[in-house]
Amino acid sequence: MQKLFINALKINVMTNKGKFGNTIIFHKGLNIIRANNSSGKSTCLNSILYALGFEILLGKKGTEALTPVLKEQLIFGDEVFKVIESSVDLEIKNSKDEFITITRHIKSSFDNRLVFVSKGKSVTGGGPNESNEPYYLHSVGSAQNERGFHRYLANFIGFNLPTVKTYQDEDILLYMECIFPLFFIEQTRGWSGLQSTTPTMYQIKNVQRVAVEFVLNLDVSEIIKKKQQILLRKTLLRNKWDSLKNGLDYISSSCDGLVRNYPSHPITTIEHRNIPFVSVKKDNEWIRLDEYLIFLRECLGNSKSGMDVVLESTDNNANQELKVLKNTLYSKQMMLETTQELIAQEKGAAYSLRERIVQLELEIKNNQDIIKLKRYGAIVQSKLEQGECPTCHQVIGEVLLKQPNDKEFLSLDDSLMFLKQQKEATKFLLNQPEQMLGLREKELATLERDINEIRIKIKDINNELIQPSAMPKISEMREVIKKEENLAKLESLLKQFDQKTTELYPLMDLWRIILEDEAKLPRDTFSETDKVKLKKFGEDFTENIVKFKYTSKITKGITISEDNYKPIIDGFEMASGSSASDNIRLIWAYILALQETCSQFDSNHIGVTFFDEPGQHAMANVSKFQFYHRIGHIDRNNNQILVATSEEHDTLVNMLKEIPHNLVSFDDKVIKPIP
Amino acid sequence: MNSNNELLPFNAIAKLSFRKRPKLISPDLRYFRRLSLIILILKYTSFKGQGSMLKLQFFNWAMASARNMKLSLEYINEPRTIKSNIISYDPSLQRAIEFALGDEFIGFIKTGTFKLSAKGEQFLQYLINDETVLVPEKEYLKIVSTKSISETQVESIVKGIY
């Protein structure tokens, strides 16, 4: 059952001088609209395109795409009529036999971006349907938005439009405008090449290829997408795998250990003996952490045995007393320190005074000596003794300083007296610190005695508080505590490590699922069905091209390219270098082969193909005949072909002999007054 | 302020006068002590009763205090222990030598070397005979005299070139 069946087209034009228009009913299989040039046959096909919102295939948007007949003025006979209002109604049916009528205004007070849809056959069923649902076109999101007409149309046809990438790497739904160039061959641009009217404004990557893929309903895009997804999933999982390793490294590094057995690449299963573990260095050997822990526990056990001493404080009163004693001890010690400091000060003072006395005694002695020496000098007739310079006989002093200066200094006798007085004074001064010192030393002795007593008391209480016997050495205890701490640390570390290691299992499961998913996908990008479809497509195309008398190239070894689904021969695209008429044959062959192939498989072909003026470039009649023959004998139950042509009526009728068809022939204008 | 006036006799000391008094001088700066030491040094540190200015300076420093005496004996015994710049030169010794030369207790035998004169020898006898004067000095010099220090040795010690 074809996805889209064009049932009827009705063109309504209201002029200043009455109603114009026409209604065309389409049948299954081949439909031919024949009219002379410029009489409105293309207007018919274009109106269908306009009604469907695909006028962009004509190269323009909105009413721009349409001929002036429908929007400005029409000439009928010799008279000119001004268009006041115009619209087009298109009655279509989907594969579920649901009829709808699409109404789109051309010249009207309505915005031409609005499309009205009514359920049922408004054209052939008679009279406009009341239940008009408005949809809109050509605005952002019309393909995806709920009120977008193309979204509605896609649902109606039963299209599940694929998500495609734009050049900006955004994901968007494939626009239907990009698919329709495979169904609608426009009069002029449509014949310049395959899919030549495909709009590029949507910036979809490889838009022609994705359109063919969609129409043929190939799995390839899905497969590529899935493969990319699998690649992405694999990368993500590898990252997690590596970061788990880093986590384990981090844990083990806190005991200078190394992670062993960690699989460098993701794996699906792991045997128990291969589970990663931490190894640590014991002496000069790397051993497993769990084994090392056993060893440590043994060591600790040995150290602990014989150290089971219970320290218990029994007496609260004793504790209280201890506290008081300790406070007293502290204050006494403070006093002791102060006293010691004072004693040191007194001693210092006394010392310097005694030093001074010694110095004074020395000076006294020296002065007494000088008195004697002076006497000896007098005996040996020293001139200086007489206060006279030995050289110049001037008066000089006996002082070894700058001369003359005698009067400034005390005489020897006075000096002696002065020094003796000083000595006495100093001796007197010395009395005080010496007395004080005695006092302080007594204080000190008392304090020391008190402190000693308090200490003994404290020691006794301490002995009462703790069991005196079997005390282990502090160093031993410290060793045991160190070992215990180390053991606890390593145990928690091992626990952490094992905990972290279990995170491997979900990763391995995930990896297995990814690999399974990957295995489900075909080795290359095409599924088996894809290959069958493409093979059939190639065969149909070859059959057509032979029939249509393609001349440019030998018609053997023609295949459909797996890169862009264009026909290729010996690796070259057929379109290149072929003559103009061969190019037309190629388009016939390709578009028809696509429709034929699609009708035999589960595809997204709408089941309708429009050819506007297929007899281009003075095509040889034999080819044309073969073309009509081919399209006339298409599976009528699943396909519909609409052709607009300006062939001579008689020639056409002659050609269509024996070919099932529905010919709608106009001798004059298609748009004509309606009574 | 009033209480301050009562407490302190500001009125009584309204006029102050100062009188210059002779100062006490160290016996080391008296000529006869230094002269005696020069004579003793010349006598006890050489056989001929002579010595250089350097020698006199060194022993002058050595006998300035008990500490110096001890230190100098260490230097004489073990010159390598000398710490440089520890020996100070005394300008008052220079004056004492000049006085002694003028007073004819010592004389030159050549430039820079002094020798006891007859007057000096005579003075020396009194110093030796009186056992109450210059006791530590004489004791020290007696120890030094047993070492028979040469001028070169003294020079080495003073300059710290060992």
Image: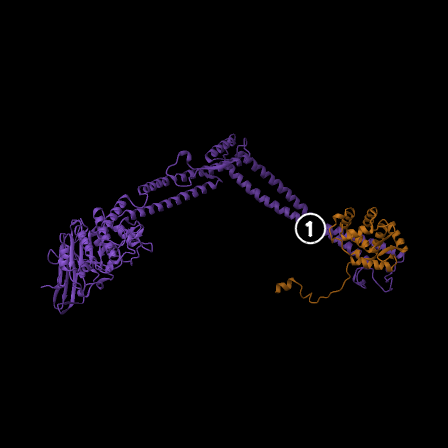
**Residue nearest the observer in this picture, A659 or B81:** A659
Q: Residues within 10 Å of mark 1 (few under 14, many from 20)?
A: some
Image height of A66 relative to A593, above or below: below
Q: Where is residue A152 in the image (x, y as percent from the top left)?
A: 21, 54
Q: Is residue A462 left or right of residue B130?
A: left
Image height of A476 relative to A597, above or below: above
**Residue nearest the observer in this picture, A392 or B155:** B155
Q: Where is residue A577 in the image (x, y as percent from the top left)?
A: 29, 56
- From this viewpoint, is residue B149 visible? yes
**Residue nearest the observer in this picture, B138 or A101:** A101
Of all chains, the one bearing label 1 is A
- From this viewpoint, is residue A177 visible? no
Image height of A427 relative to A515, above or below: below
For numbered disc 1, what is the local secondary structure? helix
Chain assigned orange: B
Q: Is residue A355 left or right of residue B132?
A: left
Split into 4 quadrants, where in the image is the C terminus of chain A?
Answer: bottom left
Amino acid carrying mark 1 in the image: Ala
- Quarter of the image for residue A188 reads bottom left
Q: Residue furthest bottom?
A: A79
Q: In this view, does A602 lie to the left or right of B15?
A: left
Q: Where is residue B79 in the image (x, y as percent from the top left)?
A: 77, 48
- Quarter of the image for residue A115 reads bottom left
Q: Mark 1 points at which residue?
A: A349
- Quarter of the image for residue B34 reads bottom right
The colouring scheme, among rainbow, by chain, secondary structure or one colour, is by chain
Q: Colour of chain A?
A: purple
Q: Residue furthest top?
A: A306
Q: Position of residue A408 (x, y in %)?
A: 78, 62
**Residue nearest the observer in this picture, B134 or A315:** B134
Count of numbered tags:
1
